[in-house]
Each structure stands twice: as C-alpha cells, then as structure tokens.
Amino acid sequence: MKKYDLHKNDFAELHFELKTLEPYFQRNKEKATKPHRHSFFQILWFKERGNHYIDYNVVEHDVNTLFLINKNQVHYFCPDSSNSGYLLHFNDSFISNSSLDLLNRFELSIFNEIDSPNFSLDKKDAKIIDDLTYNLLVELEEKKLNHLQIITHELISLLYYIERIKQNSGSFNRSTKSGFSAVVTFKQAVFENVDKNYGVQDYSELVGSHLKS
C-alpha cells in the first residue's frame, strides 16, 4: 500500500498545507481514489454530502462533516462524491516545535482512532471553523511579517476547538476514560511497525517502555 510524506526531510518547507479540496482531489484523483496512508495528520472538511473510505469502510457523511485522519490510517476518496471543502495536513513537527505536550494531547484527543473518525458540524461550529480556515488561507497567501507564528497559533486554535466539539458531543473525555492513553499508545505502536513481524510480546514491551518514559 502506498504511503505518502509531506515535505520529508525538507526543513525549508512549512510542513503544513491547507488546500481547497475539490481541485486538489481532481489533480490527485488517480492516487487519492486508491487506499493509501500518510506519515502526517490530515483534517478533511466535506461541505457537501457524500462518501469517504476510512478504516476499510465506506462512510456516508452529511454536509459539513470533519474527518480526522491519523498518521498511517488507511483511507481514500470516493470518486462518485463531490469532495468539496477543505483539506489540511501537517507533520507532527509543526506542532511539536511549539509544544511536545500539545502534540501528545491532540494525538490522544483528536487523532486517536478509537472514537469515530468523523462528525458533523452545526451551523455555529461550521461558522467558527470557516473563520479559522479563512484566516489560515490569508496568512498562507500573503506571507506577511510573523505569518509562521500566526499560522501555528491559528492551527492550534482550530485543534482546540475540534477537541471541544468532540468532548461536547460525548465522543471523548480525557478525564473519564481509564487506560485510554495505553490503548492509544498500543494502536500507534501497531501502525508504526505494521511492516514488521512483531508479536504480542514485542508490542507489550514497546507500550510498557513508552508508558514508563
């Protein structure tokens, strides 16, 4: 299965991109409509009803639906859907350069692959996310003084807001899920070593070592 990187080993790049989804999909249709994985995080905002393939299932989604794609998570775009909206993708370094604690937080709360990977936005939430997305697009286009710092701040604000929506919906609560971190760590270990012939004992040692560190 094909795996894609974002600005791999190119430290002159921003390691963050925001694209209008439909033209991006049309340019990359041949690759995007086949199952694939990324080494980076991805947020898809579908503004119209349609379908999207994730975790070996085709998910029928409503208007204004977010999909939160973790690193190494399998997905692809369904060619019969309009695929209109926005696409954000970023490497973990884009967040960890500001705060490793924030990266760990969002891996647990947003990109954990245990809760549902998608949810619909109400009109209020859609308006707020639209405003944040617009601000990011302006900064990326104009590249004025301190644009990198502002882009980082806006993305972190967006992630915090998504975390709030998920918690308000009842799909995630950091404080009430005992052992949640261990389960997430185990899943991350499996995906990172998917091409290796590891057994249960190997993963047990990996997860145990991570939790003790």
Image: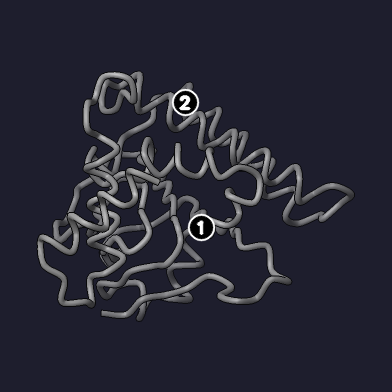
The disc at residue 89 is 1
The residue at 44%/56% (across/down) is 41
Amino acid of disc 2 = Asp
The disc at residue 60 is none
What is the image's colouring? one colour
The disc at residue 125 is 2
State the quadrant of the N terminus.
bottom left
The residue at 87%/51% (across/down) is 144
Task: Name the side, left or right, on which 9 lies relative to 67.
Answer: right
Vertical comparison of 31 with 106: above or below: below
Amino acid of disc 1 = His
Q: Nearer the viewer, residue 202 or 124?
A: 202
The residue at 34%/39% (across/down) is 63
Please state the horizontal and vertical placement of residue 43, each as a whole percent of the image: 44, 50
Vertical comparison of 25 with 184: above or below: below
Tag 2, which secondary structure?
helix
Q: Nearer the viewer, residue 197 or 35?
A: 197
Vertical comparison of 124 with 159: above or below: above
Rendered image quadrant of residue 16: bottom right
Please state the horizontal and vertical placement of residue 25, each as a whole percent of the image: 43, 68
Please state the horizontal and vertical placement of residue 48, each as a whole percent of the image: 36, 45
Mark 2 crowd level (few <14, some 14–19, many ≥20, 10 Å Cα):
some
Task: Name the side, left or right, on which 19 lies relative to 65.
Answer: right
Q: Which residue extends farthest left? A: 200
Tag 1, which secondary structure?
strand
Q: CA distance from mark 2 to mark 1?
A: 20 Å
The residue at 38%/30% (across/down) is 121
